[in-house]
Amino acid sequence: MVALGSSIDRSTNITYTSALQSYLTFCRLHSFPIDPTPDTLSFFTVYMSHHIKPSSVDSYLSGICNQLEPFFPDVRDARRHRLVTRTLRGCKKLRAVATRRKRPLRRAELAALAPTYATSHSHDDLLFFTILLVGFFGLMRLGELVSPDRADLQDPRKVTMRHSVQMLPAGFSFFLPAHKADRLFEGNRVIIQETGGADNPLGPFKKYVASRDAKFPFHPQLWLRADGSTPTRSWFIRKLKTHFNDPEVSGHSLRAGGATALAEAGIPAHIIQAIGRWSSNTFQIYIRQHPVLLAALLYGSRPA
């Protein structure tokens, strides 16, 4: 049971458990048996589509399959039944809501912040600006750089260690123990190259590491606040909002900004996918530039 419980991430397990509770509540309210037949899953899909986005119902069904499979081995067959798939497709057409994605940060915005943090001697300021730059240029998820706010979701296996840092001739690297697409905890080495511009991440990283090593020479974690704790998501977002008081800017803006910047620079899609450690072509939604405008940027100034 321990091995089975470790097959998915803690946060994913909580989401799946919530989906199961919604399903059990639905069955109780409507006097349905909990046996996940195609009929029951189809009714559940219609019911939930009146309360949440149909795209989220799709995720709920995945969670229900995960949670009920030990008790109902045929649950995935029921999920793939034509009645369920067509019901879900119909709900998506009838009740679809346009997806609003957070806007990407721009390199010019990072460069504009550089003078403020270049003169700061606050350790937490150095930490914030370094994470901002590393997240942008490393195409990293915010959750790979900071800890969840909930203590029960924090996983020491995902913490980046100081000893994994390597200084390179034109940048630096560190070992990322695990990420969302890394189901086997094999890890990846993240390489950040200097840019030569005002948004160059190398200088702030060196300055932060020097401060961190002076304050906490015996702590193993790479990312540490002035009080010795690991930075949390809420801490980073609060600092981010002091500069970008815009509801369209969030933790996703770092990764989206880095991917968009690479696309605008003409980097091939498969290279962007590899840098960002995406396991599928879903990475393309992070490139927040219309293909027509992107083509104009890349090819508009070239001679015919």
Image: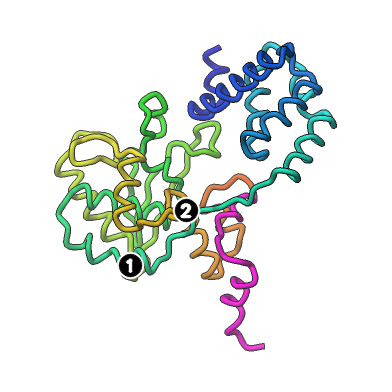
Residue at 56% in and 12% down: 1
Q: Nearer the viewer, residue 38 or 207?
A: 38
Q: Is residue 5 magenta?
A: no
Q: Magenta residues? A: 281-304
Say left or right for 220 vs 192. left
Q: Amino acid at mark 1?
A: Ala
Label 2 crowd bin: few (<14), some (14–19), many (20+), radius 10 Å? many
Residue at 33% in and 67% down: 111
Q: Nearer the viewer, residue 4 or 237?
A: 237
| Spatial CA span between label 1 and label 2 | 17 Å
Label 1 crowd bin: few (<14), some (14–19), many (20+), radius 10 Å? some
Query: What secondary structure is found at the residue carrying circle 1?
Result: helix
Q: Amino acid at mark 2?
A: Arg
Residue 246 drawn at (x, y percent): 40, 57
The residue identified by callout 2 is 255
The residue identified by callout 1 is 111
Residue 285 drawn at (x, y percent): 60, 54
Which SS type dominates the magenta stretch? helix
Residue 52 drawn at (x, y percent): 62, 36
Query: Which badge, 1 or 2, comes first in the chain's sequence?
Result: 1
Say left or right for 92 vs 147. right
